[in-house]
Image: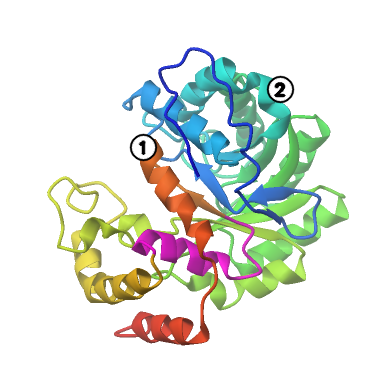
């Protein structure tokens, strides 16, 4: 797998062998194939980040056969800036390859002030997708997600808005994110009744956060839906970043992040033991963590973030070894159940 950094090149010419390495999985029983590893733009693509670096990461991703780019209206910071930066890079590098890309965005979290800039009303979802398309300079997205359940808006209204946006040609497919098993089943029933192309649920899942195993995976199989996973590395805990403690410049050491020092300390012993198994597999801890997720038949794709092209290349190497011996799975399971 030879990928060169071409971020300084004015004209982007994709790797001609980009589809030879990546594997693609069907999303449920739809016609959509997604790359086993997809790129999430949650971090590192806002106005506070270097556009040149984001451009390099996106080029590297496509050169690796990653066709799925995942965004949301409030990714940044500030809100909307990841979509704006993506739109700039798309126009420069990827416009000629639009039909090779599967682009997603979402709405459901806080986006703008007032009563119409959050949650799951028809008003919010419609306005949000219109804004997202303008920021990304796209005619449509391939999949539009409701980003989280809304406890106060009728599910029929939220799902109805998704249906209408498909019928307006602004999205080809719809998805949900952060929905549990019960809400997934309800949403599926509503969307199937209107023949809406509902294909996927996006949820957090990792070795250290296995909540979807209890009920959701079965619900996804029952409803013929795919599953795409975010935070597969548990916000960086399942990397070599914290093997020797908590670096001062790490995510856990910073305030106002999703990863707290106490959580890293509580899982540190598990991380060290898992890393030993990864080494025996000739993998990094992050590569093994990704492969462990992809072993499940219900999982369509794993969303990874990247702060550099090299980091993305290293994580995609997880595909070099997706096989686990039963004794490896048993050893991993024993570690994960310790003190849990």
Q: Report which residue position mark 1 lands on.
A: 308
Give the foreground label among 2 and 1: 1
Describe the element under mark 1 as helix, strand or loop: loop
In the image, which residues are magenta? 283-301
Is residue 274 rendered to the left or right of residue 264? Answer: right
Q: Which residue is pictured at 67% across the width and 25% down the height?
A: 97
Q: Which residue is pictured at 58% across the width and 22% down the height?
A: 13
> Number of numbered discs present?
2
Furthest-left residue in this view: 248
Q: Does the magenta stretch include residue 239?
A: no
Q: Which residue is pictured at 20% across the width and 47% down the height?
A: 255
Q: Horizontal and vertical percent for residue 95?
A: 64, 20
> Which of the two discs, 2 and 1, labels the residue nearer the N terminus?
2
Q: Report which residue position mark 2 lands on.
A: 139
Is residue 92 rendered to the left or right of residue 162? Answer: left
| Residue placed most toward the observer, 192 or 15 | 15
Q: Horizontal and vertical percent for residue 104?
A: 62, 39
Crowding at dot 2, Cα within 10 Å, few <14 / some 14-19 / many 20+, comes out as few
């Amino acid at each position: 797998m030879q990928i060169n950094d071409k971020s300084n090149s004015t004209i982007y010419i994709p790797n001609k062998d980009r589809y030879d390495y990546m594997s693609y999985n069907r999303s449920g029983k739809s016609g959509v194939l997604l790359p086993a590893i997809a790129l999430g733009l949650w971090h590192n693509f806002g106005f506070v980040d270097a556009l040149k670096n984001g451009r390099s990461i996106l080029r590297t991703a496509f050169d690796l056969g990653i066709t799925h780019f995942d965004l949301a209206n409030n990714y940044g910071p500030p809100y909307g800036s990841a979509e704006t930066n993506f739109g700039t890079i798309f126009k420069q590098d990827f416009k000629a390859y639009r039909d090779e890309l599967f682009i997603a965005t979402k709405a459901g979290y806080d986006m703008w002030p007032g009563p119409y800039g959050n949650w799951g009303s028809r008003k919010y979802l419609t306005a949000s997708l219109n804004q997202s398309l303008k920021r990304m300079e796209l005619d449509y997205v391939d999949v539009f997600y409701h980003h989280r359940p809304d406890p106060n808006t009728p599910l029929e209204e939220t799902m109805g808005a998704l249906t209408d946006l498909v019928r307006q040609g602004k999205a080809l497919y719809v998805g949900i994110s952060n929905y549990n098993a019960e809400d997934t089943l309800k949403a599926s029933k509503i969307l199937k009744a209107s023949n809406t192309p509902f294909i996927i649920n996006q949820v957090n899942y990792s070795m250290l956060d296995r909540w979807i195993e209890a009920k959701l995976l079965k619900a996804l199989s029952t409803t013929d839906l795919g599953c795409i996973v975010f935070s597969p590395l548990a916000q960086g805990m399942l990397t070599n970043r914290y093997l020797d403690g908590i670096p001062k410049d790490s995510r856990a050491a910073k305030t106002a992040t999703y990863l707290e020092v106490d959580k890293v300390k509580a899982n540190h012993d598990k991380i060290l033991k898992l890393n030993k198994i990864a080494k025996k597999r000739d993998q990094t801890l992050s590569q093994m963590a990704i492969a462990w997720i992809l072993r499940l038949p219900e999982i369509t794709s794993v969303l990874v973030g990247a702060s550099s092209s090299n980091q993305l290349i290293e994580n995609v190497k997880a595909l070099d070894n997706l096989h686990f011996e039963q004794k490896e799975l048993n050893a991993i399971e024993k570690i994960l159940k310790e003190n849990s």
